[in-house]
Amino acid sequence: MGRWSIVATKPLWEAVCNGEEIVKTWNDGKTEIHKGDPFDILKTWTKEYKSTLLDDLPSIGQLYGSWGYELINRIEPSVPINEMSENDIPFGSWMFFDQLVVFDQIKRCITAVVYADITSSKGSSIEEVYLNSLSKIQKTRNLMRVPLKENEFLDWNENENLNLDLQSNWKKKDFEDAVLSAKEYIRKGDIFQIVISQRFQTQVNNDPFNLYRSLRMVNPSPYMSFFDFGSWYLIGSSPEVMVKAEKNKNSQIVASLRPIAGTRPRGIDYQQDLELEKDLLKDPKEIAEHVMLIDLGRNDLGRVCEIGTVKVKDLMVIEKYSHVMHIVSEVEGILKNDADVWDLLKASFPAGTVTGAPKIRAMQLINHFEKDARGPYAGVYGSIDINGALNTAITIRTMIVQPSKDGKYDVSVQAGAGIVADSSPGNEYQETINKAKGILKALACLDK
């Protein structure tokens, strides 16, 4: 788990992208409709704000949201995307907050943050703006003192049996045939690797926030997240940074990404865990795939970083999670003076670990193999700070939840497998299941 947890409610404004349009809704109900590149539009909106840096706090961000996979078409039009159905999640959903609560898990303290807007305070004096901000902080403190009601405690039981009514958007044979077809593209030299994904769907009675609470117990990760976008929820436990950027002591913006590629299930005991770790690091297929994605990450950063600054910081270390272990590396560089975090996000979106390489051709073939829009899966979720910091995770190990007409909730979980020249179709199919298990277990552990 990470050091910092951030809670925010009642955004100043929200924005939704459903294709060609991006709709901005203010907290007073006023709406604006804009057309154009959503990345550039959001950049323009956030550039309107400035704030001071807060001592002893991270770059906590004000813009939070989800950039769905299909937004790649707005960056690279040569990548086709699947048509959205009526029930599909928007291409992107974002919220801009001027009030946040920050939890420091190490110092065990809570900080309430309010951004006092002195530029558009409608004639109010600075003192009035300050006192109004203090009032907001006091209301937040009062809310945090309210104890849980008895029926709000989580009814949770450890359950290894995934007794869920699951539906997949692939038949096993069709998935394996797609792997064989992808290997043929690799043999011909079209691509080196491609990620083909599988979506699992089910229905539950449980409140979405309880799904998040269960997921925290079953599959904790550095990027635990709960987003309530009104018509849908993103409940994430991603282990993987998409891209991160923050200023160093020299006021340079350091950009970093951490490709994850190479997977084994966790062992039943310490000794088996070690054996699986050694086996993973000796697997030529996994190592070749990982090195390829390191190179792809270096290439992405190289587009917006100063020449000579892009370096591999950590090379092929093992990180262990509740159900799987991965090979992980870290690549970082110094952002060019004429580039910002929005340029960085566009240059690296989406991550090569969920597409393949070369990235554009791999994405074109993903559209050929996968018949459904990916939606939030394989995009990113996270935050952007108005002072120029970025912190995003790849949308994997994530539940997408929508209310259904019968009062229940539809839940989908998607996972992919990286296909290379010597991939086994059966093994790749099983890998998607292994990756989804930790998330699906969180559903099984809640009493129906």
Image: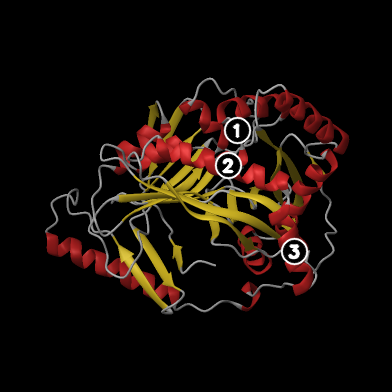
Mark 1 sits on what residue?
357
Q: Position of residue 121 (x, y in %)?
A: 19, 52
Residue 157 visible in the snapshot:
no
SS assignment at label 3: loop
Alpha-carbon distance for marks 3 and 2? 23 Å
Q: Residues within 10 Å of mark 3 (few under 14, many from 20)?
A: many
Q: Which residue is mark 3?
A: 266
Q: From the viewer's perspective, tell me whether residue 347 is left or right of residue 85.
A: left
Q: Residue at x 73, y 50 (%)?
A: 283
At label 2, the amino acid type is Leu
Residue 322: in sight, yes or no? yes
The answer for how far apart the CA atoms under marks 1 and 2 are is 8 Å
Which quadrant holds residue 144?
Answer: bottom left
Do the CB atoms of the residues marked 3 and 2 lie less than 8 Å apart? no
Amino acid at circle 3: Arg
**Element on which disc 1 rests:** strand
Q: From the viewer's side, name the closer residue of 112 and 413.
A: 413
Pointers 1 and 2 in contact (CB under 8 A)? yes
Secondary structure, mark 2, is helix
Foreground of the two, 227 or 197: 197
Q: Which residue is mark 2?
A: 293
The residue drawn where x is 13% and y is 64% is: 127
Is residue 2 depicted above or below 175 in this figure?
Answer: below
In the rendering, at what x and y percent does residue 448 appear? 78, 63
Chain-order first, disc 1 or disc 3? 3
